[in-house]
Image: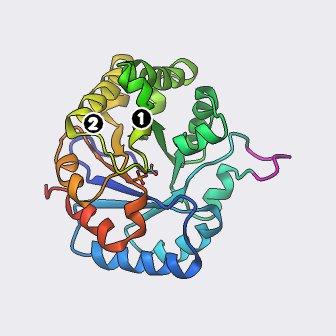
């Protein structure tokens, strides 16, 4: 994977997280719609994270496009007797360049620890996959005012185990759990404050890694709130769940990225 040139401001990135949605027919329609709608939007980079069985379809439809594709999880092990798991090298076999790690819908349902998530991030990097690491707090934690402590611990676990250079050329998505799938997005002010906190936390351990880190916002992004969110310089893009399943809404979100 090529290193980004720090002198050239990179495009904002919009990641579609299809979660456990799709079929061969629906995916094809979505991808064709994305490709058509994105023709006039060179300022927006787009990645689609599909369910595992559709990686081959994503590869065949996207290989000659400027869109990237990836998965929504991976195993922390290289290979072996881990029934139901999918390893990083398998994702690479289908040309995946990205993988979502630590999404709250997984970490809550499958009790993933911060340590487990940190290991997955390193496995992804070893295989040339760009991790999209999800961090964020619950509503109770925000109401208690401990959101920075919670997100800080998620980041510090990676820094403690693998060093802050682990964040170079990766993507962190700030995803307040209370905003995911609820229709209640964070305000631009809330998101910017947390994005600054995330960048400062990495920078205090490794300035150059923090300069090579993209920080996205995720949580009920829609065409209306995308304009404000994506116009913040601290917000490098968005992770989009529900609205990525509707071509018109997804393209409108991509159109909200300001022209450089
Ligand atoms: C997500 O899947 O990470 C997400 C942000 O979903 P939604 O846009 O539906 O809130």
Is residue 82 covered in magenta?
Answer: yes
- Residue occupied by mark 1: 168
Q: Quadrant of the C terminus?
A: bottom left
* Residue 44 occupies quadrant: bottom left
Of residues 158 and 222, the one drawn nearer to the viewer in this rendering: 222
Is the residue 148 above or below the residue 127 in the image?
Answer: above
Residue depicted at 68% across the width and 45% down the height: 75
Q: How is the image coloured?
A: rainbow
How crowded is the residue under tag 2: few (<14 C-alpha within 10 Å), some, or many (20+)?
many
Query: What range is drawn magenta here?
Result: 78-84
Is residue 188 covered in magenta?
Answer: no
Residue contact at pointers 2 and 1, CB within 8 angstroms = no
Query: What x and y, as percent, mark residue 130?
Result: 49, 47
How crowded is the residue under tag 1: few (<14 C-alpha within 10 Å), some, or many (20+)?
some
Residue depicted at 46% across the width and 73% down the height: 62
Is the residue 98 above or below the residue 154 in the image?
Answer: below
- Residue occupied by mark 2: 191
């Amino acid at each position: 994977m090529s290193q980004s040139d720090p002198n050239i401001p990179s495009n904002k990135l919009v990641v579609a997280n299809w979660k456990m949605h799709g079929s061969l027919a629906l995916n094809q329609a979505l991808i064709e719609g994305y490709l058509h709608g994105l023709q006039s939007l060179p300022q927006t980079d787009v990645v689609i994270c599909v369910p595992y069985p559709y990686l081959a379809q994503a590869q065949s439809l996207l290989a000659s496009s400027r869109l990237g594709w990836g998965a929504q999880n991976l195993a922390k092990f290289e290979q072996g007797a881990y029934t139901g798991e999918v390893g990083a090298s398998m994702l690479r076999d289908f040309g995946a360049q990205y993988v979502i790690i630590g999404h709250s819908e997984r970490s809550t349902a499958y009790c993933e620890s911060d340590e487990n998530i940190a290991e997955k991030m390193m496995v992804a990097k070893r295989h040339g996959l760009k991790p999209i690491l999800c961090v964020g707090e619950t509503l109770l934690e925000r109401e208690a005012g401990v959101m920075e402590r919670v997100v800080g611990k998620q980041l510090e676990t990676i820094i403690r185990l693998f060093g802050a250079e682990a964040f170079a050329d990766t993507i962190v998505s700030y995803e307040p759990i209370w905003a995911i799938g609820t229709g209640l997005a964070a305000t631009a002010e809330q998101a910017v404050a947390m994005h600054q906190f995330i960048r400062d936390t990495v920078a205090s351990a490794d300035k150059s890694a923090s300069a090579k880190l993209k920080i996205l916002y995720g949580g009920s992004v829609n065409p209306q709130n995308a304009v404000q969110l994506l116009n913040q310089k601290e917000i490098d893009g968005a992770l989009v769940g529900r609205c990525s399943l509707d071509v018109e809404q997804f393209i409108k979100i991509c159109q909200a990225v300001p022209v450089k």
